[in-house]
Image (tube, grey):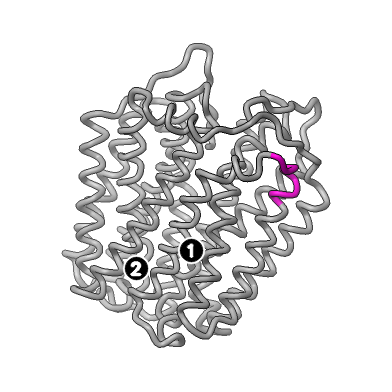
Amino acid sequence: MSELTQRVEPAWGAVFSMTLGVLGLVTAEFLPASLLTPMAADLGVTEGMTGQAVTVTAAIALVTSLLISSVTRNIDRRYVLLGFSTLLIASNLMVAFASNMTELLLARVLLGLALGGFWTMSIATMMRLVPDDLVPRALSIMFSGVSVATIAAAPLGSYLGDIVGWRSVFQMAAGLGLIALVVQFMTLPRMAPSGQTRLRTLYDVLMRPRVGLGMLAAALVFTGHFAFFTYIRPFLEIVTGVGVNGVAGILFGFGFANFLGNYLGGWMIERNLRMTMIAMPLVMGVLGLSLVSTGSAPVLDALMVALWGMAFGAIPVAWSTWLTRTVPDEAESASGLLVAAINTAIASGAAMGGAIFDISGVGNVFLASGGILLLAALLILKGVRDAEAPGHSSPQGL
């Protein structure tokens, strides 16, 4: 979509419906991280194998993010977005009734399609729902769904899974998706496709100075994080030695700190974007190595997990701002590339973590995670730059 139809009056109801969509998608994406142990036991496989549910989702989202605009270029965007919410509901219901790993992975394929497609189109959709000067506010509202899901999904998933079972938790997630679908059906306007998206544009953007290296650095940061986050519950149970209530409490602390980190990141970026981009993975890398060395220390581990969540809260803000400053004229194509890089990282982090977990234990997963994050910080220090475009104001809250 090279040209976007602008609205005179903001469609805040539609913006809210997109926020609900984000909440439902992110909740479903990372529920396995808080339900890994009971899911593995029920399906009769290892935690490392079950963690591949995250890998499959991310891998499919990666491919979808690169192809979805071209594949759906002749379809009204309202119907495309409603289709993503329908896939979200179907995926959660299939997971809830899965009897083996094959069925579970097929269900997560549907979620990957919804995730990759939704994120790729979300920024362009917001630009059609509100006037230019309100786009940053609309994006901030939409991304608040990520923060709410981060706070609620992991601890509630762990807590409710222990009470009603992990299958019921996914049924609840399907209900959340249904609410999002209904609200979207009621509020999203018709949005005829505008322009013809070309795959060549993605290549042209990637070949620009600083863009390719920046995408690699972003992928390393997210790989390190998701190797950590996907296997946080087994680490807390095996190494830290806490029960299900302790896991829920620590994950809540992580989510709340992550929410605060969003605002901390915005404050830091206003002062020095590049320093923020270096400091956050550096802090997370040190925390990953420190968690392994402390052993069974619940209070200290809880504090370090919370600090990790706060540091990571600034990461999406920082990289989204970097993107708007580095590729202001092709933000949609660059967004697709960043979505692809992040999903590559999620898949790589979960897959690598699962292999290490099954071979040598969860402690070494965290060692690898910390090492990757330190490498990312070094790469950003050496080669990643940002450039404020003339007359361009970076949206805060992204």
Residue at point 34%, 54% (across, down): 225
Give the secondary structure at mark 1: helix
Answer left or right for 133 relative to 288: right
Q: Counting residues from the N terminus, which is met first, the one under dot 1 or under dot 2?
A: 1
Does 78 appear in magenta? yes
Which corner quadrant of the image does residue 70 belong to? top right
* Up/down of 78 relative to 385, above or below: below
Residue at point 36%, 75% (across, down): 49
Residue 41, position as x, y percentages in the image? 41, 86
For residue 231, which numbered disc appears in the image?
2
Answer left or right for 72 relative to 38: right
Residue 209, position as x, y percentages in the image? 34, 23
Residue at point 39%, 25% (across, down): 271
Question: What's under tag 2, amino acid-wise?
Answer: Tyr
Q: How far is disc 1 from disc 2 in space, using C-alphas?
A: 11 Å
Residue 124, position as x, y percentages in the image? 63, 35
For residue 82, which numbered disc appears in the image?
none
Question: What's under tag 1, amino acid-wise?
Answer: Phe
Residue 304, position as x, y percentages in the image? 30, 58
Does 299 appear in magenta? no
Find the magenta span and give its range: 74-81
Answer left or right for 197 relative to 282: right
- Return the residue at label 1: 30
Q: Main secondary structure of the magenta part?
A: helix
